[in-house]
Amino acid sequence: MAGTCSCAQHVKKLNQQISVMRKEIKNLRLLIDSAVRTHRKHFVSLQSVLRNSDQQVRPHTNPDQKEGVGKDIFLEQGNIQTVPIGYISSCFIEKNGTPRQPSVCSQSRATLQLESTVFNNPHHALIGLDQYSHVWIIFIFHKNGHLSSKAKVKPPRLNGQRVGVYSTRSPHRPNALGLTLAKLEHITGDTLHLSGIDMITGTPVLDIKPYIPEYDSPYSRTDFGTTVCPDAAGSLSVSRTETGCSPTFSHTGGCMVLEEGQTSNTRPVLLKEKSTAHVLSTGDPASHVPQVDNVTTILGEIKSYISQSNFLIQRTGEENAPLTDRTRAEPCESQQAEPKTEVCYDETSISQVASWIREPPVTSLCVRFTPNAERDLDQFLPPGKRVPGQPSFRFLQGPEDAAAAIRGVLRADPRSVYRRMSCPDRLFYFTLDSAHITCWFGSDFAEVVQVRLAEPTAAGPAD
Ligand SMILES: C[S@@+](CC[C@H](N)C(=O)[O-])C[C@H]1O[C@@H](n2cnc3c(N)ncnc32)[C@H](O)[C@@H]1O
């Protein structure tokens, strides 16, 4: 009996083990299935990219052409190979606390050194680029963490609402490509010095293109017409273009176009009133190209309505708000609005953007520093200056510059929607240059409580 009993117990134990193993096998199967599904999705999306690129390239190929076989045929066959031309070295080391767009923090800085493996003389590739103030940087979101992407995402500005990934600038997209318009401060040899960036250290860069408003901004797309541009001082000048293809620019902002037939006697339709038009129309089809005196009158009219309402002259608190004596806090009223451009047209008459960009359901925050945090920040020295025992920055110009950068980052509320909703009063940490910053958030403010020297990381030295 005793033998039967122990045998039965043994069988029971074995059965239990088998059932545990079955459960584990089931879980493993589920895991494998989901991995296969994810990979299949990527495989399918890659296939469709390749198919499309094949279709686009094919019509241009000459079957008799023998030259350039290697690289061209490779591309024609859909083998898209990209090699980073360089890697970003940035004042942001981790994603946390990195601005969501470059406009959020104009003080942010980075360098981009061209890889010597891409060109024999990398600096040759930069000749002429120093004539531009801004450059497009095309890069890979290499720290996305996972390859999968969803058709709908929740942009932070929408506070949890979902929209299609292609209506956003989310890093999580099928081909994890990022696009940043950065300010080109200067070039030294094979290295670009950039500001106003939103990329972390180590970001692989695929391409650099000069920013050319005449090509890249809808303000300058004229089919035919006279281009009216404000100069740096805000006064207007007119230049006539026969083809309308290359209007003269005297200002980095937009230009307005006077339609052919514009006369001095009819008040131009306000851009606001004509939402889809790219021109100021007089509604006078019989009239001819404006004469010089007509143009002068038109200019007068335009100037007057600009001064009334149509131009928004907005300055950010960022550069112009004086720092109060010992506090780096900004007046909160100036922070309720999103960062603005200096002078802008009524943009809605020319380009259209999703409403949540200009009127997000989230407001910007008031940023303040505790006296302790201010003292901490004052310890930091500008790049190149070294005093034993004192921290120094690698990119930022000093405590004031850093304070402005911190304000930019925090004003835009860098927390994830989850954090904002689920644990709003938890401490938030981020690294900026060689500073590790600790802060907390209230409903309409962020307060910096501590600034200390960041630990060196694998991504780069802290100091
Ligand atoms: C919303 S994306 C926008 C980037 C670019 N301006 C664009 O529109 O494509 C900016 C965010 O990407 C993240 N990021 C920056 N560099 C990254 C990288 N190399 N890999 C993954 N995420 C990165 C940071 O968290 C940053 O806040």
Image (cartoon, helix red, strand yellow):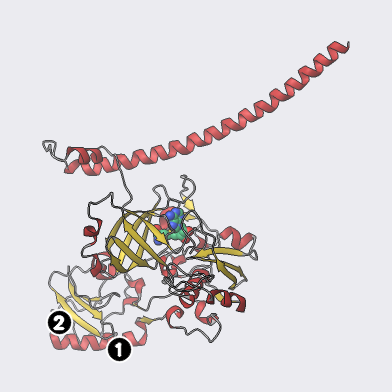
Left or right? Give the position of 202 relative to 247: right
Question: For the view shown, which residue lies furthest in the front direction?
Answer: 388
84 shown above or below 29: below
Can you tell which mark lies on residue 64?
Answer: none
Residue 87 in percent (x, y) is at: 37, 55
Q: Residue furthest left?
A: 64
Q: What is the CA distance from the residue labelled 2 to the residue labelled 1? A: 19 Å
Q: Name the quarter showing ligand 1.
A: bottom left
Residue 304 - label = 1
Where residue 174 appears, x then y in whole percent?
41, 47
Question: What residue sits 46% from the left and 49% below the top?
Answer: 151
SS at mark 1? helix
User: Tag 2's secondary structure?
Assistant: loop
**Amino acid type of disc 2?**
Pro
**Image height of 137 relative to 247, above or below:** above
- The residue at 46%/83% (across/down) is 321
The residue drawn where x is 63% and y is 65% is 427
Circles 2 and 1: CB distance less than 8 Å? no
Q: Is residue 60 visible?
A: yes
Q: Earlier in the sequence, mark 2 or mark 1?
A: 2
388 relative position to 340: left or right: right
Depicted 148 relative to depicted 359: above or below = above
Quadrant that contains the N terminus? top right
Q: Report the residue marked by disc 2.
A: 290
Where does the image place residue 99, in percent across and percent down from the top left? 46, 64
CB of residue at label 2: within 8 Å of ligand 1? no
